[in-house]
Structures are given as C-alpha cells and as structure tokens.
Amino acid sequence: MLLRVVCAIDEKKIKTEIEKWLSELDVQVKFSHSRDEAWHELTRSCADIFIISKPLIPKPVVSNINILNALPEKPLTIVLHDSESSEEHANLLASGVDVVLDSGIPMESLCEAIESTIESRRQFNYSTRFDQRGRFQPKLSDFISNSSEMQFFLNELQQVVASDSTLLILGETGVGKEHLSKAIHAESPRSKGPFVALNMAAIPEQLMESELFGHEKGSFTGAVRSRRGAFEMAHQGTLCLDEIGEMPLRMQTKLLRVLQDMEF
C-alpha cells in the first residue's frame, strides 16, 4: 500500500526542506497551505502519518491528539516542536503523540528521523497485512492434478509468476480463480506487497469508481473524508478484480485505460 503523509508545517524553510526530502521517498505527500484549515485537512484525510508543527494543534492538545489517534487508519503523529524543554516533549508523548522532534536540530537529522518513522510505519503495514486468523497462504503447489493439460498449465504459471504482467484468468465459478491469484501473488516478486481482491459483481455501479480509484475530500456530495481506492491499496502488490465481465462498459473503458497507461 502506498503510504500517505499529510503535513501541516508553519515554518517555511522547514516545510521546503521536508518536502524536498519526502519527494525522494515512495510516499504520497500532501501539504496544508492554509494555517486556518490545517487541522481540518488532517482530520479529513486518510493519512498513515501526520507531520504537524506544535502551534498548529488546537487546544486542548490532548483531546485533539486523541481525535487523530481514533481515526480508522490508526495514523502515526510526528510533532515538530521548537522548544528544548524535556517536560513539554514528555507531555506531548503522554498525550498520545508518537514522535516529538526538535525543529531546531540540523535539517538532515530531522529529515532522517522522519524517514525512519515512515519506514517503521511501512514495516507495521507489512506485518499486519496478512491473514490475522492464522490461515495458510496459498501456493502453486496446492494445485495437484494428473491431467497433462493441467500440468502444462502449472508449468506455464511458473514462468508467469516471475513477470510483472497483467493476467487474465478465465474459469467457471468455483474452480479456484481467486485462490490461484493468491498463489501467483505469494510466489511473485510482489509477494511482500498487499493482495487486494474485489468482486466487481458485488459493488453497486455508483460506488465502483470510488472503490477502484478512491476519492478526495469534497470531490462529491457526502465525501467528507478522503478515501483510498483498491489500486492505491494494492501499491507494490497485486490487485485481483473478480467478475470483471459484470462491470458496466463505461467502467471497463476506464479500467482498460488504467491498465494500458499504468496510471490513474
């Protein structure tokens, strides 16, 4: 999954340097450009990590940090503080802030500390990605057959799993297409990334575009928070779209364009 980082930083020089540093990392970054709206932009985003200057946290600080910690994405919060007071740092940590950084330290050290926190979050996402109920992960060796045609098919799959190609899997309902998709993912170079499966026949047409591509806050009536789509959730992993034949032609056209251009 592509990590989202949302920043509300009041000091222009620090903001510029952090923006430059983050542009080199594999993350999606958004900066608040309005001091008055900064807090609302944070709470309505769907970020994994918040970077915020201490003066931009509304009072009471404890209550508002609790609001961030209660968001469904369970974000990490990094607070930039211009005070060297160990007591103030301790109070921020006690209020639920994950990391407190002195904004007066050398810029390279500050950015390295932020990058370390980002990597910690990435590892957290990896560790919680798989089945929490202890079920085994599918493998190609699960498929056993005496059929020469099936054995030929499985041999072909061994060559496919090493590629980065888009695959179309055809078969009757119940033959194990999704299980096969998971097995291909588990043995592919993308196995360290997430496996995201969507049954397109089960998604109402009016929600399909949002499910696939996500949306930003305010993009339509009722969109009070940003939302990740399946393509973003599957970043560096595998997206399995089941029953694509049930998709409306309009959505199939959009999907085809994404698969051809590899961007959305």
Image: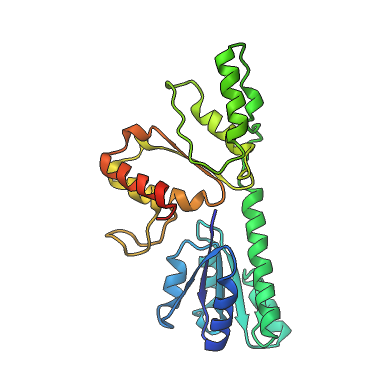
Residue 197, how many percent across, how many down? Answer: 48, 39
Residue farthest to the right, as pictured: 86
Residue 75, percent from left and from top: 56, 62
Q: Is residue 31 visible?
A: yes
List x then y, in percent, for residue 145: 61, 14
Q: Identify which residue is drawn at 55% across, 15% down.
A: 149
In the rendered view, tell whether residue 151 sits above or below residue 177.
Answer: above
Of residues 39 and 249, which is closer to you in this image? 249
Whether 159 is drawn above or below 143: the answer is: below
In the picture, measured across the screen, residue 197 lies left or right of residue 110, that is left
Q: How is the image coloured?
A: rainbow
Q: Residue at x 51, y 85 (%)?
A: 10
Report the residue that reaches farthest toward the top: 146
**Number of callouts in the render?**
0
Left or right of 239 in this view: 136: right
Tell me if residue 131 can be seen.
Answer: no
Q: Is residue 172 left or right of residue 147?
A: left
**Quarter of the rendering containing residue 186:** top right
Q: Residue at x 53, y 33 (%)?
A: 181
* Along the viewing direction, whichever of 156 and 190 lies nearer the viewer: 156
Q: Position of residue 119 (x, y in %)?
A: 66, 62
Name the quadrant of the C terminus.
bottom left
Q: Nearer the viewer, residue 129 or 179?
A: 179
Q: Is residue 115 above or below residue 121?
A: below
* Quadrant of res 102: bottom right
Q: Residue at x 39, y 52 (%)?
A: 213
